[in-house]
Image (tube, rainbow, N blue to C red):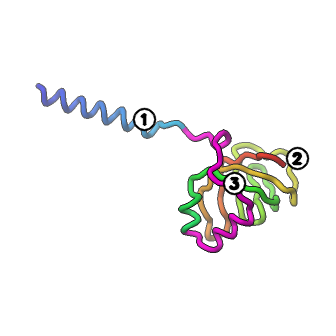
Amino acid sequence: MKKWGLILLVILIGGIIGYNYIYQDHRDIETEKPSFVLTSDSLIDEFSKNTTDSEQKYLNKTIEVSGKVTEINVEHLVLNGSIFCQFLGPIPNSINNDQPIRIKGRCIGYDDLLEEIKLDQSTIINH
C-alpha cells in the first residue's frame, strides 16, 4: 500500500513540475531592459565576422538597435538592409524609409539564406 502511495506522489509531483514548465510565463520584451545597446552597423559587422559567436552572444537576448529604415511592411521592417524586425502589431504610418530609428527586440538568430539578423517581438523606442 505504501508503494502505491509513493508512486502516486511521484506522478503528482512530476505532473506539477511538467505543467509549470510547459505553461511558464511568456517574456514581455517591451518592458525588459536590453542586454545590449548598439548600432545596426556594429551588429551587422559582428555577424559578418563570426556568425557562430555572434549567435551565441545575442541569441534569445533583448537588444536595442539604432539604424536607418530600409524596408517597411505591415508587421515588419528592415534596418540597414540586414536586420529584420518583426512586430506583434502594425507599424505606425509615421515610419518612413531612410528614417533613423531605435528598436528593441529579441534576437532569434541569423538567416544564412537572406543574410539577415532576425529580431522578433520588436517595439519602436523612438523615431
Which secondary structure, mark 1? helix
Q: Which range is magenta?
A: 26-52
**Above or below for 37 versus 51:** above
Q: Amino acid at mark 1?
A: Asn
**Above or below for 125 versus 14:** below
**Above or below for 126 versus 18:** below
Q: Looking at the image, is mark 3 or mark 1 earlier in the sequence?
A: 1
Q: Is residue 43 magenta?
A: yes
Q: Which mark is residue 37?
A: 3
Quarter of image, res 68: bottom right
* Residue 59 in picture, x, y percent from top left: 57, 57
The residue under the point 66% across, 52% down is: 63
Residue labelled with disc 2? 94
How many residues crowd mark 2 within 10 Å: few (<14), some (14–19), many (20+)?
Answer: few
Residue labelled with disc 1? 20
* Residue 62 in picture, x, y percent from top left: 63, 50
* Residue 81 in picture, x, y percent from top left: 76, 66
Which secondary structure, mark 3? strand
